[in-house]
Image: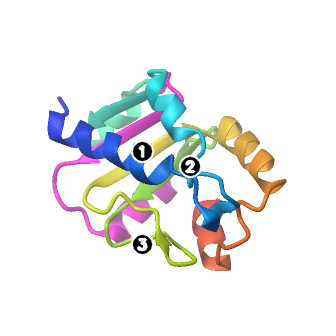
Amino acid sequence: MVNKKIISQLEKWINNILDAPNSKFGNLPPCPYARQAWLDGNVSVKMWEDAKSFEADEWDKQVHIYVFDDMMDPHTLSELACEYNNKYPEFLFLEEHPELVEDVDGFICNQGELVLLIVQGRKHLEDAREVLKKTNYYENWTPEMKERIIER
């Protein structure tokens, strides 16, 4: 069970950071689809129990956020995301860690406190990225940021 404080932290991140239009993203929000998915009930939030429970889970929402209750180090979290990206190619696994700073031309996109593994359907996310590529959205992204976030 996810406690109310974590839900509040995620909601604040979505509303105040991910959904706020920003000049660093071509005047689009850092994650233009996050708030609507949240409002539509297309986001599930669960505590990470263990790899066995995770692999048996059903991913039937647009976004699944797994919250780690202990402070997993960023390297291990990145390795876990990579492992699952290879194991489940129809999904995209994104690591969110306070020490893995996502800096776009001086704007920090991270949640900043929670250790998360975010699961999304790969096709849906790649289709959305193609739409964004037709705008100035990625103009301020460094090659390293593009490699880490997009080119998986």
Asked if the residue at tag 2 contacts the one at tag 1, i.e. Cβ–Cβ closer than 8 Å, the answer is: yes
**Whole-percent x, y for residue 57 in the image:** 38, 27
Q: The C terminus is located in which quarter?
A: bottom right
User: Within the magenta stretch, is there residue 65?
Assistant: yes
Determine the image quadrant of residue 98: bottom left
**Whole-percent x, y for residue 6 in the image:** 21, 42
Residue identifier under label 2: 31
Dot 2 surroundings within 10 Å: few (below 14), some, or many (20 or more)?
A: some
Disc 1 is placed on an element classified as: helix
The mark closer to the camera, 3 or 1, is 1
Q: Earlier in the sequence, mark 3 or mark 2?
A: 2
* Residue that lies at the very extreme toward the right in this rendered image: 134
The mark closer to the camera, 3 or 2, is 2
Q: Residue at x 41, y 43 (%)?
A: 15
**Residue nearest the observer in this picture, 11 or 130:** 11
**Residue nearest the observer in this picture, 50 or 15:** 15
Q: CA distance from mark 1 to mark 2?
A: 8 Å
- Please report the bounds of the magenta region as a residue range: 59-83
Q: Earlier in the sequence, mark 3 or mark 1?
A: 1
Residue identifier under label 3: 101
Left or right of residue 136, residue 28 in this image:
left
**Residue nearest the observer in this picture, 55 or 127:** 127
